[in-house]
Image (cartoon, helix red, strand yellow):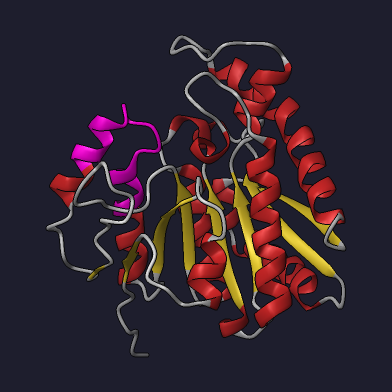
Amino acid sequence: MAQQETYVLKVGNEVFVNGNGTFYNERLSDIVTQIATVRREIGKKCILVSSGAIPLGRKILEKIRSDSESLGEKQLFSSVGQAQLMKLYGEALSSHGGIAAQMLVTRDGIKAPAHSDALKVVLKGALDNEKFILPIVNANDALDTDELKQNGGNNRLAVAVAQLIGASRLIIMTNVNGILRDKNSSESAIKTIGANDISWKPKAHELDQSNNGAGRLSQKCEIAQEAARTGLTTQIVSGLQGGVLQRILIAKRPTGTTFEAVEQNY
């Protein structure tokens, strides 16, 4: 598995769902189109870490999001939503000749050598296959309740997967185009941040407050910077705009905010 050929893309709930709980199927389809286009034009392969199961399950069961939701309710939403989420990905991929490969993991599982080795084998098998197989990884929220309790679970999972397979970069899609100098301008993002630069924190917290906490940008940035310190370039971009993967990976245009990796000397 050539490092330069593989990237990890993490897509957050906030890309698929608005404040009223509406799930935008067309955004999921557009992201799949972007992944397929990058693969076709420059040969880069993707591992997708996708949120969305819980809000999709909530929608299917005709429930409205509430701060009083129990852990059991969230587990049920995840269980119902995960099946539909994979159905949507499968349908979107089929129009590009692609196949969805679901991989549900637990936080403890990916830390255990036997489980991480098994995951690496199946990821490698999917990426090296002659067919277009898109590995779609998600935390098994129906069983791993620790993931539901902790914030940033899927972001940390994406980092772990990227490190496991030696990805060239991690791209985190959220609902804001990185750390913006001007919250009213999506083109005002701080383009690059060093692994030890913390000057971004006040601006990220300000964006969290103006966005009612949706997407938890500051938390994503903390995780991204931690990843950069381990040698993984991590980029935070808006998934609400089309063609973002093409801009980053094909046109190589600065997009969103990139936490630059520290070179690792072994």
Q: Is residue 105 above or below residue 144?
A: below
Q: Give the residue furthest to the bottom.
A: 266
Expressed as whole percent of the image width and height from the top left, the position of residue 66 reads 48, 11
Question: What's the residue at 67%, 19% (across, down)?
Answer: 59
Compare residues 68 and 107 and report the one nearer the observer. 68
Q: Quadrant of the N terminus?
A: bottom right
Expressed as whole percent of the image width and height from the top left, the position of residue 34 reads 65, 61
Q: Is residue 21 left or right of residue 45?
A: left
Compare residues 192 and 243 and report the one nearer the observer. 243
Expressed as whole percent of the image width and height from the top left, the position of residue 243 reads 56, 60
Q: Please, what is the dominant secondary structure of the magenta stretch?
A: helix
Q: Which residues are magenta?
A: 205-222
Question: What's the residue at 48%, 61% (across, down)?
Answer: 171
* Residue 117 can be seen, yes or no: no
Find residue 215 and report its image quarter: top left
Question: What's the residue at 75%, 25% (across, down)?
Answer: 80
Question: What's the residue at 50%, 45% (across, down)?
Answer: 240
* Residue 110 can be seen, yes or no: yes
Q: Quadrant of the C terminus?
A: bottom left
Q: Is residue 95 above or below residue 62?
A: below
Instruction: Count every numbered label the image shows and give the total.
Output: 0
Magenta highlight on residue 162: no
Q: Is residue 99 above or below residue 62?
A: below
